Amino acid sequence: MMQATDLRLTFNPGTPIENPALRGINLNIADGEFVTVIGTNGAGKSTFLNAVSGTTRVDSGSILLNGIDVTKKTAHQRAHWVARVFQDPMAGTCEALTIEENMALAYKRGGKRGLNFALNPNNRDLFKEKLSVLKLGLESRLTDRMGLLSGGQRQAVSLLMASLQPSKILLLDEHTAALDPKTAAFVLELTDKIVTDNQLTTMMVTHSMQQALAHGTRTVMLHQGQVVLDVAGDKRQGMTVHDLLDMFEQTRGEKVDDDSLILS
Ligand SMILES: Nc1ncnc2c1ncn2[C@@H]1O[C@H](COP(=O)(O)OP(=O)(O)OP(=O)(O)O)[C@@H](O)[C@H]1O
């Protein structure tokens, strides 16, 4: 369970380029809920995810993960609880290390023991078994360097890595945006499977309203640093992009001014 309460953050306060990126975000996510997050450019989506993961500190407000207040904890201290897959396939894995070394690092995420401890025969079998689910033949390439994999393969392995240890929340930050449409569809399908199989509490930022409605169990829209729409259950079932745009217009009294959000 994640509870984000009145999160506020202003970049460059007191300067001519002062920017209130988070203006009181309130969002509670129940265990096992898969929330898709959309919003116009600059709405604060990445900043919000950074605040949850601890790579950005908020000015005020609180973030609780399973009842534990992590607001003042560093990203490193939160590593036990927060798993993340980034937009850039290069960002979440180390290309100089092998597939099994990357997986071993993920397996010991937040732990103190060394890489060699996690690279034992039992774990190798586990990594192979997990990789075989991808149906990409990577289970026979454990000692290949990560840098040899395509962007889609790396994102697929990143997703597996994120689910190797139980986390309180999985953050997906436009993790398919850099992939071609076919590979993106494959990685999204895999995301659904991994999230469902492992009952992961998940927040997925996407720049596609269509994707936001087609995946997950709940959709939240951010606008100017606040949550302005929040739909789930029957209300969300069968909802179209057009319905969502109408809802935004009725709530805000303005139209969505971001073609990429509407058209992608
Ligand atoms: N490190 C930073 N320093 C100053 N301003 C920042 C910084 N990071 C983000 N911002 C600003 O904060 C606002 C929110 O940015 P953020 O990246 O969270 O938006 P976003 O919703 O993820 O947008 P996009 O869809 O374009 O990626 C924007 O106006 C952005 O320019």
Image (cartoon, rainbow, N blue to C red):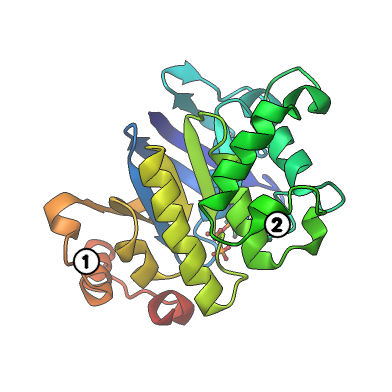
Judge from the rendering whether residue 59 lies leftward or rightward of residue 26; answer left or right. Answer: right
Q: Amino acid at mark 1?
A: Met
Measuring from the top left, give residue 176's x and y in whole percent.
Answer: 55, 65
- Residue nearest the observer in this picture, 82 or 229: 82
Q: Which of pointers 1 and 2 indicates the residue nearer the eye?
A: 1
Q: Which residue shows up at 41% across the image and 38% down it?
A: 198
- Residue nearest the observer in this picture, 16 or 173: 173
Q: Amino acid at mark 2?
A: Pro
- SS type, badge 2: loop
Q: Quadrant of the C terminus?
A: bottom left
Residue 138 in view: yes
Judge from the rendering whether residue 101 lies leftward or rightward of residue 127; answer left or right. Answer: right
For label 1, the residue is 247
Q: Which residue shows up at 72% across the image and 34% down it?
A: 104
| Residue positioned most to the right | 96
For label 2, the residue is 16
Badge count: 2
Measuring from the top left, give residue 77's x and y in whole percent.
Answer: 67, 23
* Residue 124, placed above or below residue 244: above
Residue 51 in view: no
Measuring from the top left, give residue 55's x and y in whole percent.
Answer: 67, 38
Judge from the rendering whether residue 143 lies leftward or rightward of residue 218; answer left or right. Answer: right
Q: Quadrant of ligand 1?
A: bottom right
- Residue nearest the observer in this picture, 249 or 13: 249
